[in-house]
Image (cartoon, helix red, strand yellow):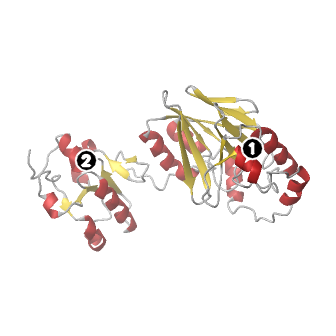
Amino acid sequence: MIFRQLFDPQSSTYTYLLADERSRHALLVDPVFEQARRDSALIDELGLKLAWTLETHVHADHVTAAWLLRERLGSRIALSAASGAEGADRWLRHGDRVDFGKRWLEVRATPGHTDGCITYVVDDCKAALTGDALLIRGCGRTDFQQGSAQTLYRSVHEQIFSLPDGCLLYPAHDYRGLTVTSVNEEKLYNPRLGGQILKDDFVGYMQHLGLAHPKQMDIAVPANLRCGRPQEPARDAGTQDWAPLTYTFAGIWEVQPQWLEEHAREVQLLDVREPSEFDGSLGHVPGAVLMPIGTIGERAAELDKGRPIVTICRSGARSAQATVLLAKAGFTRVANLSGGMLRWRAQRYPVDGGSE
């Protein structure tokens, strides 16, 4: 099985990508709206087909990307029938199974943080995604959104601590940079729920946390009750529509050689190699302007912000970094030539200079 743990620094949310290696069918658990492009790029680069987006609960600290990914990738949305949300393609209940290829997740209802909290257990019981029901050495709060300390205590002990001791547990959040724990670790060391802590001890602990409400709560909860569908859909401000670009998992917009060969006159061609390379064996794209990457900071004013820019180097590595530098300088329509001059020459597009 393919497994990736992704992180949103703004909300400290973990998003999980799981896929069946043979069929390439994939699930995305707890996707974040602002990270939809990142997640789509990874799915594309790994050659996966996103079948479902799943929620562990209705989040109060970020807006889900479920609706956006359904619009872009055709995936379906699933979350708890007890969530109170609308707009999902499937409503999950305790004991259900979500299949992706020949693999699946078992649905375990673990309410207490919210009524609709779900823990997803991987088919071999070697890993589980616990949402906010159980965090690493902690747990989700129980003071709003149908929270109940008594219910959460029962959920964790009956549905999570009953898993094999070696089962790895992956939470929906962590604010200290911790990534994974295990059933045995939490049974032993969780200061709220582990050891010999009884339900009354836990209830008293949770009643005196004194936490402020999440900053995004008033925005996130209503949006997540619509599965992330905006009330007034807006154009993605980060979209570049001047060419059929792709967005890589590394965060770089790229254009393919075929399109560039046909539309070279419509853009500014910026070769960021050194002069010896520009006039060297690979040659350069006709019409390209030489601006070594080390000079972009001081020479960016020479470029026209009104016309798109395509950056070029030998392999696409330096030119990828050049797009980052240009973005910092205020250029909004910039893309990297995928594969650089090596791919350009391999596909036998015209060059100035160079040698066979």
Closest to the observer, 253 or 181: 181
Q: Is residue 5 left or right of residue 315?
A: right
Q: Position of residue 149 (x, y in %)?
A: 85, 51
Q: Which residue is mark 2?
A: 260
Q: CA distance from mark 1 to mark 2?
A: 49 Å
Task: Give me the residue at 19% from left, 41% from top.
Answer: 346
Residue neighbourhood size for the residue with mark 2, other residues' Cα within 10 Å, grouped as few (<14), some (14–19), many (≥20): some
Quadrant hosting residue 90: top right
Q: Position of residue 72 (x, y in %)?
A: 50, 40
Tag 2: amino acid: Leu
Task: Give me the residue at 28% from left, 68% from top.
Answer: 296
Query: Do we see residue 132 in this rendering?
Result: no
Q: Position of residue 167 (x, y in %)?
A: 67, 40
Marks 1 and 2: CB-CB under 8 Å? no
* Disc 2 element: helix
Residue neighbourhood size for the residue with mark 1, other residues' Cα within 10 Å, grouped as few (<14), some (14–19), many (≥20): many
Q: Which residue is mark 1?
A: 117
Task: Give me the residue at 74% from left, 55% from top.
Answer: 138
Tag 1: amino acid: Cys
Q: Is residue 261 above or below residue 101?
A: below
Outermost residue to the right: 200
Q: Is residue 213 left or right of residue 65?
A: right
The C terminus lies in which quarter of the figure?
top left
Closest to the observer, 347 or 198: 198
Q: Is residue 234 above or below residue 73?
A: below
Task: Give me the residue at 23% from left, 65% from top.
Answer: 292
Quadrant hosting residue 129: top right
1 or 2: tag closer to the N-terminus: 1
Outermost residue to the bottom: 298
Q: Is residue 158 above or below residue 298?
A: above
Q: Position of residue 34 (x, y in %)?
A: 55, 53
Q: Is residue 94 above or below residue 131?
A: above
